[in-house]
Image: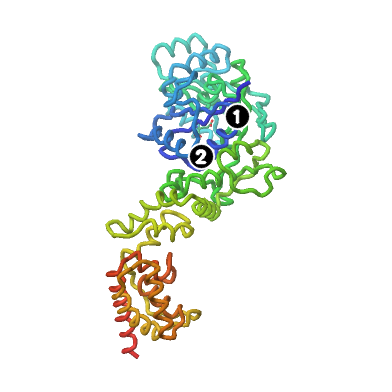
Amino acid sequence: MTVRTRFAPSPTGYLHLGGLRTALYTYLFAKKNGGMFILRIEDTDQEREVPGAVELIYKSLRQAGLFYDEGPDVGGDYGPYIQTQRRDTYMPYAMRLVESGAAYPCFCTKEELQARRDAATARGEQWKYDKHCLHIPKEEAMRRMQSGEPFVIRQNIPLTGTASFDDALYGHVEAPCDTLDDNVLIKADGLPTYNFANVIDDHLMGITHVMRGTEYLSSAPKYNLLYEALGWQPPIYIHLSPVMKDASRKLSKRYGDPSFEDLLAQGYVKDAIINFIALLGWCPDVKKYGDKEFFTMDELVEAFDVSGLSKSPAIFNTEKLLWFNHEYITRMPFEDYLAMAAPWFDKALAGKNIDYRRLAELMHTRTELFSNVPDQVRFLAELPEYDAALYTHKKMKTDPAVALRALTLARPVLAGLKDFGEESLKEALMGLAAANEMKTGQMMWPVRTALSGLASTPGGATEIAYLIGKEETLRRIDKGIEMLKGLEEAH
Ligand code: GLU
């Protein structure tokens, strides 16, 4: 048996992180078992259709490195892989169920349903469809369907007994039939609902293992009744615990939680996201992997096993993701870092003549998140407003008076420097400090402060002076001197 798994997103316009995790596990499971990973687009809820959303799914899965073997844009023997393009596939199976009594057409109008639902609610009852149309004689029902009268097809759940299925993770799941509703299988527009399409498509596409969120756990017994009625073998189900924002709610785009695309746009590195997501509710075999935390995609394929999946909800910990991101950035080859960082440098430094390569060297290990980079380097383009208190540093043994002396001494030396490279700058400033019996820090701290206006910077005085160049260095030193002199006069 060849393992065949599928990821079956609805085109909502983004890939939420729970969805990304489902896709990842589904992919890993297929690859681990030498199987096929299939993409199927579940777009039968046309009211929720978002333009461009399908293309975004293709793009996001590729960006994530989750390459599917079959799918709408790659083809395969089981297509079409978009449900609205399979429109004609479902009705014959629905009619087979109608024939055998496992389903029936329903002609109730929205108004009629609403009135009966309201009445049930008024009686304090939980509404479920009352099988009103089940009692229409078959011939009459057929005639009405053919006459063009609007209808839906409903699953006919037995009145008694139980429905059940076995989940690879959650075990035997059972529901008393009298708690289950006669769900719509085919809607008035002729398209199937998820409840029907998932069964038909998983079967026709030869899916052997279904991984999806636990929100489908309670409906799966009903799907099993459909498999039974059609005489089909159901796939193996592996339901996945929810990804939570915190103890009380699921991660959700509606509450402003980021999607996969949002994380990429914020400057998270794809490999860090995948590594982090993989460990959200799954744990590699401790005997084999110990406390190893870093996994490449190939390593994940190798390590993935259903036995490591957790049944408890996984909490999405942004701090941990950020930590992974920083680690991945730090470990990335310098040239890759430079290529990724350059567009973020541009956001703050475009048009300035700054040595990006040198800046990247200084920023590489200081980058936690690329979207923070523009703010971290903006001071090179524009000196921020700062307070004279910044010149005071206990350990460096400087204060505004020491700083004024340092800057006043440094000004002509820097102005006279022909070579404004870091070595030459360092030599000049250190030499100057020594010649005037100042500690190195008493020279470097004031200069760094005057050049940056910040308490902490990538690089020190000489690196910053080199990056912003002589003219700007002198301008900023002058500004510092002016500020410190003003301070003295005020005393
Ligand atoms: N279209 C469903 C969703 O996006 C997929 C559920 C499944 O994998 O069967 O939630």
The residue sitting at 46% across, 29% down in the picture is: 42
Q: Decide if ligand 1 comes within 8 Å of the CB at mark 2.
A: no
Q: Find the distance from the CA under tag 1 to the CA under tag 2.
A: 22 Å
Q: Decide if ligand 1 comes within 8 Å of the CB at mark 1.
A: no
**Between 193 and 294, the one nearer to me in the picture:** 294
Percent across and percent down for residue 183 are: 53, 26
**Between 427 and 68, the one nearer to me in the picture:** 427
**Between 133 and 336, the one nearer to me in the picture:** 336
The local crowd at label 2, few if under 14, some if 14 to 19, many if 20 or more residues have their Cα within 10 Å, is many
Mark 1 or 2 closer to N-term?
2
The residue sitting at 34% across, 69% down in the picture is: 384
The residue sitting at 42% across, 11% down in the picture is: 146
Percent across and percent down for residue 255 are: 46, 49
Instruction: Identify the image quadrant of residue 275.
Output: top right
Is the residue 292 above or below the residue 171 in the image?
below
Looking at the rendered structure, the kind of residue marked 2 is Leu
Q: Which residue is mark 2?
A: 20
- In the image, taking residue 141 as reference, residue 424 lies left or right, namely left
**Between 425 and 69, the one nearer to me in the picture:** 425
Instruction: Identify the image quadrant of residue 409.
Output: bottom left
Residue lying at the far bottom in this picture: please name it.
491
Which image quarter holds the C terminus?
A: bottom left
Is the residue 151 above or below the residue 477 in the image?
above
Q: Which residue is mark 1?
A: 220
The residue sitting at 43% across, 30% down in the picture is: 45
